[in-house]
Image (cartoon, helix red, strand yellow):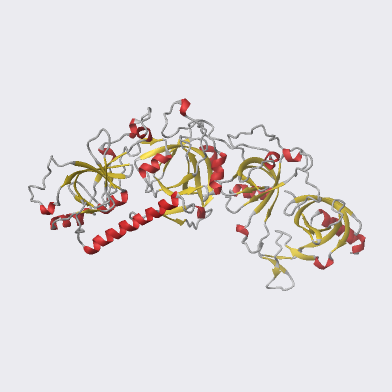
Amino acid sequence: LCRGGLAERLCRLQNRERSAISFWRHQCISDDKIPSDKSGVLIVKILEIFEECTIQVAICQQLEQSPAALSPEDALINAEEPILKVLFTRETAAHLKSKPQDVIHIYPPWQKLLLQNTDVPVIMNTYFSQKVLHNEHSEAREKTYGLTKMLIRKNIISLAQTFRLDDLDDKLHQESSDNQVPCAPQTHNNDGSKQHPSALGAVNDSLLEMVESQGAVGWREVQVRVVIQRVYCLPAREGYRSHTQGNKPLCATPVTNTHPPNVRLCLLVQDAYGMFSEVQLQSLSSTDDIEQYCRRWEGKSCCLAGMKILQRTTRGRALGLFSLIDSLWPPVVPVKVPGQNQDSEMMTTNLPPPSFCYILTVQSGEMHVEVDEEEQISNLYQPPAVHGLKEILGIDGCNERCSFWAQVLYQRLQSKHSVPVDQREMLLFVTDSTLQNAVHEIPKVVAVSVTVSCVLSVEIIEALSAASQLVFFKDALWGNGRIICVERTVLLLQKPLLCSAAGADLSELTGPVRLDELDSTTQANSVCALRGTVVGVNESTAFSWPTCNRCGNGKLELCPRDRELLYCNQCSEVVTTPILKMQLEVFLSCPSRPQSTVKVKVWHEMTLFVLLTMLLFLQTYEVQSVLGKEVGLLNCYVHSVTTHPNCVALEEIALL
């Protein structure tokens, strides 16, 4: 909150108000009596109770004095006494646990509101209220009240009715007893657990209205109709489960899931008013399911019920979520505007982007997500806009979501030895026809960083480890000259059923892939093509190691039974004819970087290694025999580029 601003002052005022109410109630309980000061006290007797917009409304009769001082005859309802409409907040109502015929003392500073065209005054600011128990019978009845079930009428008021719009939805205007909900803890009985047949009958189209009318504890009576804009997975540690204790606010604790893959299916949905919400559903048994959910659900309408609010997040707290929301804004079709007539000329897309979003989750055992898979794609749905990589590199903005097709040429884990392998970022080096056909100053291959929070399916991981693949990157993040796959980014092997190409060149590659040659613009953590002349071999760092001739395992051990033989743990057999592998460091002179020392690490079976080994063998391992030999073009990964000393460290690699 801005220091000294209205929001900060309001927050302080609310905190002081809550403290004052808690202190006053604690003082009343400690004294075990009603405060003696009766000046300004409003005494009312409740005749009827119902709930509207989370506020408890009590139709009351004002009494001149407490019933304790009245005779039984005088305590009866007097038609001449004024009728009042008293408003209690949810917290105050839960504290009072009032019901018809109860007498309530309302202490200052209560306020009376006189409305036009009505004779019944409204009493507000009733935080300092206390129920009167004037005899032993009332106290005994009060003790048993917590174990009984009381139903109150709950009026659901639609936004259309509130703003007096023309298209009133009669289904939402329910004031019948069918829509009653318990206002106190229920005893265990067989009927209490059954859901009313009409409980899921009403369908709303506003997420915000549902939140305001149903509250944070959950939606039980009605459904809300939304459009599924995106389907993705989040790591379970990103999701939360909510716990409620009485009337305390929701607190969130991380989800721990001991079963792989420990990911949760999520939906980004949008309602008819343009408001977004993220719905966190059940954990998936396999990450491979995400592709079929994307294909079946995205763009379809669905009805949500049995939800509860996990969190209300804002742009500053969830940059990743709002970068995805911003990519879907403004809506492709006009949306409804709260408080305005819904004629076509009043529906506008000239609206500011959302500043907050509700994270919803399912209530235990009450999930109800009904997707009509046979229905046509909604007009509100925005498919991913597919761009060429060359176009993406030219985007000026930061934290922009982008989608593209690309050929994965090489993958590499970031070499942070202090970080476990399963928690390291992965680099995917990709290209497409727009880069391969580009002129100078446009790289032919770009690196895509895949963070740990980006959930990859087993199918994607296995496919990339086998061969070069054409992969669809959906909703990746572009900013500061990098493409990053973060949470809510989805990688697919199949092309989505719906996507907008926007005139981009998405033709597949024909012919061999070209890499940028090493030059003065080459940066670390990139790939390049290298040609040059051998000027030296670092014999001090050369080493060799034996590997299994069956599985290629490079960690052989001495055989326990015969210390002169090697043993492979993976094959569980003795290795009699191991394959010797070696590593060399070779210094090259490159015309593209004449002032730099170019150091290349070469491995067994690489092009340069085979060439050098052959020359060394023919010349009986004389290093002088390989000096001056020209090599290239070699595919290399750039480890580092330094200026003091002027050195480039590379490693020869094999593309997928």
Residue 92: where, in percent of width, then height? 29, 51
Residue 124: where, in percent of width, then height? 28, 46
Say whether residue 545 is left or right of residue 5: right
- Is 579 or 138 nearer to us in this picture? 138
Give the quadrant of residue 146: bottom left
- Is 329 or 575 nearer to us in this picture? 329
Q: Is residue 75 visible?
A: yes
Say whether residue 403 is left or right of residue 279: right
Give the quadrant of residue 370: top left
Name the residue: 32% across, 37% down: 198
Looking at the rendered structure, the number of numbered marks drawn on it comes to: 0
Residue 616: where, in percent of width, then height? 89, 61
Q: Is residue 243 visible?
A: no
- Is 509 or 66 nearer to us in this picture? 66
Above or below 129: residue 616: below
Say whether residue 258 is left or right of residue 166: right
Above or below 534: residue 314: above
- Is 281 or 14 nearer to us in this picture? 14
Name the residue: 53% across, 47% down: 233
Residue 52: where, in percent of width, then height? 31, 41
Above or below 455: residue 575: below
Name the residue: 61% across, 46% down: 399
